[in-house]
Image (spheres, rainbow, N blue to C red):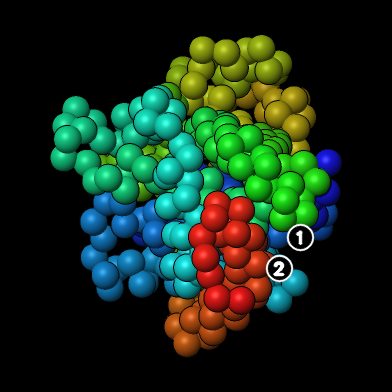
Amino acid sequence: MTKFVERVFSGVQPTGNLHLGNYLGAIQRFVEMQKNYNCIYCVVDQHAITVWQDPKGLQNAIREVTAAFIASGIDPKAHIVFNQSQVAEHAELAWVFNCVARMGWLNRMTQFKEKAGKDKEAASVGLFAYPALMAADILVYRATHVPVGEDQKQHLELSRDIATKFNNDFAESIASHGFEEGFFPLPEPLIQGAATRVMSLRDGTKKMSKSDPSDLSRINMTDDADTIASKIRKARTDPEPLPSEEEGLKGRAEADNLVAIFSALSGRLVADVLGEFGGGQFSTFKTALADLTVAKLSPITAEMKRLMADPAHIDAVLADGSARARTIAAPIMNSVKDIVGFIRAK
């Protein structure tokens, strides 16, 4: 069996307005994973253009995500931080995977249905095919682990399906090029801790999103302390006190969401949070949650603003990360070309 170097890959779309859901659902986890894995963290700007983006706004958003990575504690020297479009191998492998993946597989992707809405004919081809690009993002580094939220598990399963089909379709060629059994790994999901899916502060049944018309529905990474505290005070709840046991959160989406956020920000178990605040009124709990959120996010926000004031530094980080990413991706892509049967200069 081919031995694969353990490697984590994940990315964040630069679509502007980073919020608490992005931080707790992705970036905070990225920071923790640095301790145990070799990590590659990507600003997936090619995914962003599956819907139209203002070019200047896109550049700003790419830098903002990079600033958030660094401000949150990701070390771009010990690990790799880069933007996808600077490494051409992502797009090259995505085309090969477009030819490996089946239409039926992509038709089952629920996120396309949600994002395209009723008028699927007007959606871009990129929006339909982007799960194949996502698979390429992961497998062009032969990554073994991917931190994903619950809503991304289907796309990771597709990546595993594509890897399996490639390994089977080209088994003879893979072996003839010196690979023992299977060229691509089947990447494993890393889903850890509370608040993998942070919900809206106005509706606990909907995911926190930058596209929600109400700014009160989310805590932006650029919000100041007063704004954060105000949004938490105004967060929708129900008239009942907080329960003392986790079972009591069932059917109470808003309460469940706020407790999960507290748990994730504090690093404490939900049971411990309820042990402290259970039986009390939401006003007391919200005050504690606001203080915790401000304490956690304010230093990150300040550092993001400092970094964003020096775009040349951010661009240099991305250029360095992209060069290091290419040193991994290029030989893997060259092997793919050999396996598929392309002729290339050597």
Q: Secondary structure at mark 1?
A: strand
Residue 91 percent across, percent down from the top left: 44, 59
- Total count of labels: 2
**Identity of the amino acid at label 1?**
Asn
Q: Position of residue 1 (x, y in %)?
A: 83, 41
- Judge whether residue 117 can be spotted in this image: yes
Residue 186 x %, y %: 68, 39
Residue 327 horizontal side relative to residue 108, left or right = right
| Left or right position of 53 against 66 | left
Quarter of the image holding residue 160? top right
Which of the pair 91/242 is nearer the observer? 91
* Amino acid on which disc 2 is placed: His
Residues marked 1 and 2 touching at CB (< 8 Å): yes
Query: Nearest the camera: 18 or 100?
Result: 100
Give the residue drawn at x 63%, y 35%: 168
- Mark 1 or mark 2: name the one nearer the start of the chain: 1
What quarter of the picture does the C terminus occupy? bottom right
